[in-house]
Image (cartoon, rainbow, N blue to C red):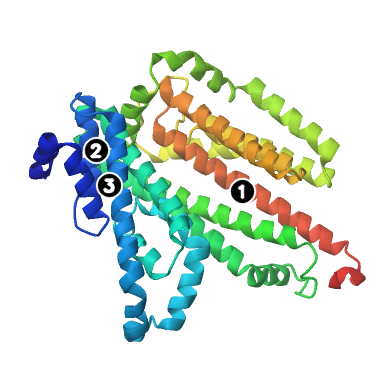
Amino acid sequence: MQLLTGLIEHFGYTVLFMSLMLELIALPLPGEFLMGYAGVLVFQGKMNWTVSILIAGTGSCTGMTLSYLIGHKLGAPFFYKHGHRIHFGPERLEKTSSWFKRHGNKLLIIAYFIPGIRHVTGYFSGITRLRFSTYSIYAFTGAFIWTSTFISLGKLLGPQWEQFHTSIKKYLLLGSIFLLIIFTMGYLLKTYKLKIKVLLLLGLGKGAQRFQSLRRLRFLIGAITVIFLTFVIIMGSLIENYLNNEFKQFDDLVMTLIPLIFNEKWGVWMKYFGMFSSVKALISLVVFSVIWILIRGTEKRIESSFLLIIVIGGEIYEEGIRRLFHHLHPVHALLPKYVLYPFPSEQTLTAFVLYGFSAYLLIRHLKKGAFNILIIIMTGITIMMVGLSRIYFLQQSPSDVVAGYVFGGVWLSLNILILEVFRFSHKLGNMPDFEAGE
């Protein structure tokens, strides 16, 4: 490693370009470490930030292009001739190629952050005959996102880069795998939605003969189920890490990055962001949700009841789990005295639940796709900034904030799931027999 850092100090951009190109042809080079170290040199004024990203991105794109061309020229004939020996003959290759052409391009962006995966995606894209114009858009975009991330983090952290390098790789890897799991779940849900819907109908005791009616509602239930289970799995992991006191490394990393990204000039904005989790803001949000239900709700009684459950039950839920974890964990962070039970964060949990449910009600009764996307983006930014303000003012630890999001996600998705199942059952129960075949 010292040899490579010495080379990049002396030859700079040339080593950065060559190392990333060769790594993406599948040579065992520590590209992420070198990009981070290049960021440190940027911090020291020895390299230029913009030029470093351009050179690193171009090197990555060159490596991905070469691996694609090698796969395109040599890969397919090999599998057609010898693939049956590894149970990957022509028929399976065709099926895989067809899937990859439809969905694989989206994985190219995520793949860079997963060691081992990024080294083969170029070859596989070529083998499966993915159109180069499509391939290059996703692969080159992912290359510049990947290189920008590590060089920028190295620049931000400066001398502390080596201390947090392993942690950064770990959390970026976990985030990428999480996105990959979400993508896979979405694909499986879409591919096997027929079987899932039939099972849902059977579970509700209505049989599969009414399959064609309420199609969107059944698919929505399946999607929410996947989201709920994902939150539950993450929650289980967080609980284990909390009880084993394994959040220190994560908290130290985030608490180091936040002041570097958001300086003292952000103080006023952070105060405004924090106000979105105030009692007045949340009460106004609940009132707005009630008015929206009364104006646009299709089943006002059901939706109003669940809003009441989410608000009152959510308060009991968050207070109970915070007290429970306070007593289970013997070590507590040094926080202001008024933060009695920091894990999970009360503010981020409540904001996630109430803003999330309000956004869900808006989207549920609007038919404008572009406007719905805007609602999702704005809601996500609001919830994220609430948590960020808590970290910025040292009111809560990053792990407490993240846990608030996850525990809030569990409560929100569970209630929406029950609401939609209840709505589904209610509609089926009121459906006349002649609608069965519609």
Q: Closer to the camera, 127 or 191?
A: 127
Give the residue pinned by disc 2.
Answer: 36
283 with respect to 252 (left or right): right
Give the residue pinned by disc 3.
Answer: 59
Residue type highlighted by circle 3: Gly
Q: Residue at x 82, y 63 (%)?
A: 428
Q: Closer to the camera, 432 or 335?
A: 432
37 with respect to 322 (left or right): left
Observer-side mark, 3 or 2, equals: 3
Query: Which secondary structure lies at badge 3?
Result: helix
Q: CA distance from mark 3 to mark 2?
A: 15 Å
Disc marking residue 413: 1
What crowding class fits label 1: few (fewer than 14 Cα within 10 Å), some (14-19), or many (20 or more)? many
Q: How many dots with numbers?
A: 3
CB-based contact (under 8 Å), mark 3 and mark 2: no
Query: Which secondary structure lies at badge 2?
Result: helix
